[in-house]
Image: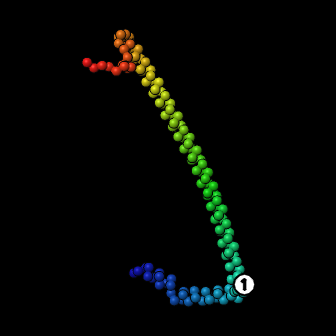
Amino acid sequence: MNTYSESFDSNYAPGTWSAFVIGAAIGAAAALILAPTSGRDTRAYLRRRGNELGHDAMERGRELSRDAMEVGRETLRTQSERVKSAVAAGWDRAGNAISHAREEGEAAYREARESFQQSDPGMARTSYRTDSPRSVE
């Protein structure tokens, strides 16, 4: 047995459709009889309310757009400041590292020079730079 077809057949019997059509007709008739205004007035009212709602929706959209733009600008300012701060901190760290490396290099140079001077005092006075060109014989 197919339970789907049985339930489908029992739910949508011809009597169900006719009851729906009769109910819709009674509802339409009641709406026409009990309507507080004429069709022309109702259409004018719906048109006016539709325009008002449309204008309200447009204004609300503009407000939301302005708010979103302001939030975006504020976020951009905040993130820009964070990036600037991070870049400045990076430059400071790099400058400190370079200064430290230079100081360490100069100290190592002085230490090596002093060590060299102590091991051979005569060689320590010799300069590797020459002001006059050497003659090759």
Which residue appears at 61% of the width and 58% of the height? 68
Front-lying residue, 41 or 12: 41
Under mark 1, the amino acid is Asp
Which quarter of the figure has residue 113? top left
User: Across the whole image, how many numbered discs are drawn on residues?
Assistant: 1
Which residue appears at 65% of the width and 68% of the height? 58
Front-lying residue, 79 or 42: 79
Front-lying residue, 94 or 29: 94
Q: Is residue 114 above or below residue 58?
A: above
Which residue appears at 43% of the width and 82% of the height? 5
Q: Is residue 34 visible?
A: no
In which quadrant will I find the N terminus? bottom left
Front-lying residue, 34 or 114: 114
Say which residue label 1 marks.
Answer: 41
**Secondary structure found at label 1:** helix
Q: Is residue 121 visible?
A: yes
Q: Is residue 61 above or below residue 88?
A: below
In which quadrant will I find the C terminus? top left
Say left or right for 19 vs 4.
right
Which residue appears at 50% of the width and 32% of the height? 95
Residue 27: percent from the left, percent from the top? 64, 86
